[in-house]
Structure formats: structure tokens, C-alpha cells
Amino acid sequence: MSRTLLQKREVNAAIIQAREALKIRPDFAKARRNLGVALVQKGQVDEGVSQLQQALALQPDLWDAQSDLTQIAWIMATAPAASARNGSKALELALQTDRLSGGTNSVMAATLAAAYAETGQFPAAITTARRALQLASGQNNAALAVALASQLKLYEAGSPFHDSPKSP
């Protein structure tokens, strides 16, 4: 139900409902995931990330939580504004999601490469970006493959990738 509330953008109600569900069943991974997403949407990123990580500790194959953490890691590694980036936290999250995916998810590997680059670990960024590129090509994800080829050139030049600011 809290997922439905999130879809309706009723974040406060979703937080309340998820917390109530966790009082009854603290090991309910999906409720932890929903709470984490709601907290991130409310701007409470640290607590939200913690809830997502707890959800994955309870249920490592919970795809939604893996995907959520990957998106957060991507933002922390590539945000246009330096104030929004946190390379070390991005690396921590990206390592976690890449490991949980068994290293076979091209998006998670691309995020890990970006996090390595943001922390100045360019040899690891290059190796990981090449793996992500190979995965993307093998999965017929042409758009990601093109983006990765461009990002790989930056890493080889010793530069991290940062997203462009979005137009209003």
C-alpha cells in the first residue's frame, strides 16, 4: 500500500504506513524499501539509504532496492553540482549493488565505473567501464553502450563524468 501512496506522491502517508508495517514485521524487506524511497524523496537521503541497505540485508535479491541504490549512487557520483556529489558514498553503494547483481548488470557496472572515477580511481574506472560496455553490448543496450564509450574516454583522460544540468 505504501508503494501506491508513493506513486500518488503522498510521501508523508507512505512513511507513516511503512513505519507501521515495520512495527508489526521488522523483517519486511519491501516495507523497508518503500520507507527508504519515501525518505529519499523527502530529502532524508542518509536515512533513506540506510533503510534501502537494510532491505537488501533482509532480501539481497530485492531488485527494486538494488535499482534504487544504483540510482542514488549514480547521482552522488555524477551530479552536475559538486555540492550534490559524494564520491565515497557513491562508491560504497555502487560496490554493494554491483556485487549483489553478480557483476552482470550493465547499469550497475556503469555506475560503479562513474563512482571509481569520481574518487580518482581511474584504472578501476576504466576496467569497470570496459566491463559495463561489454555487458551493455551483449544485452543489446545500444544507448548505454554509446554513453559508456564516451565516459570511458573521459576516464582514460583522467576525468570523471558529470551529468549536464537539466534544462527547466
Image: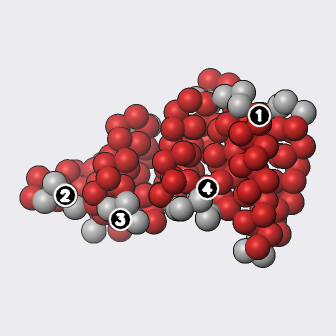
Q: Mark 3 highlights which residue?
A: 3
Under tag 3, what secondary structure? helix
**Mark 4 touches mark 2? (CB < 8 Å):** no
The amino acid marked with disc number 3 is Arg
Q: Nearer the viewer, mark 3 or mark 4?
A: 4
Residue situated furthest left in the rendering: 24
Report the residue at 32% width, 62% height from top: 59
The Cα–Cα distance between marks 4 and 2, rounded to whole angstroms, is: 26 Å
Residue at (88% x, 49% y) in the render: 150
| Real-space Cα separation, disc 2 to disc 3, in angstroms | 17 Å
Viewer-nearest of discs 1 and 4: 1
Q: Quadrant of the C terminus?
A: top right
Q: Which residue is mark 2?
A: 27
Helix or strand or loop: what does disc 1 sit on?
helix
Which residue lies under the disc numbered 4?
A: 108
Residue located beneath label 1 in the image: 122
For the residues labelled 1 and 3, say whether their Cβ atoms are less than 8 Å apart: no
Camera-side mark, 2 or 3? 2
- Front tag of 2 and 1: 1
Q: Quadrant of residue 56?
A: bottom left
| Mark 1 / mark 3, whichever is N-terminal | 3
* Quadrant housing the N terminus: bottom left
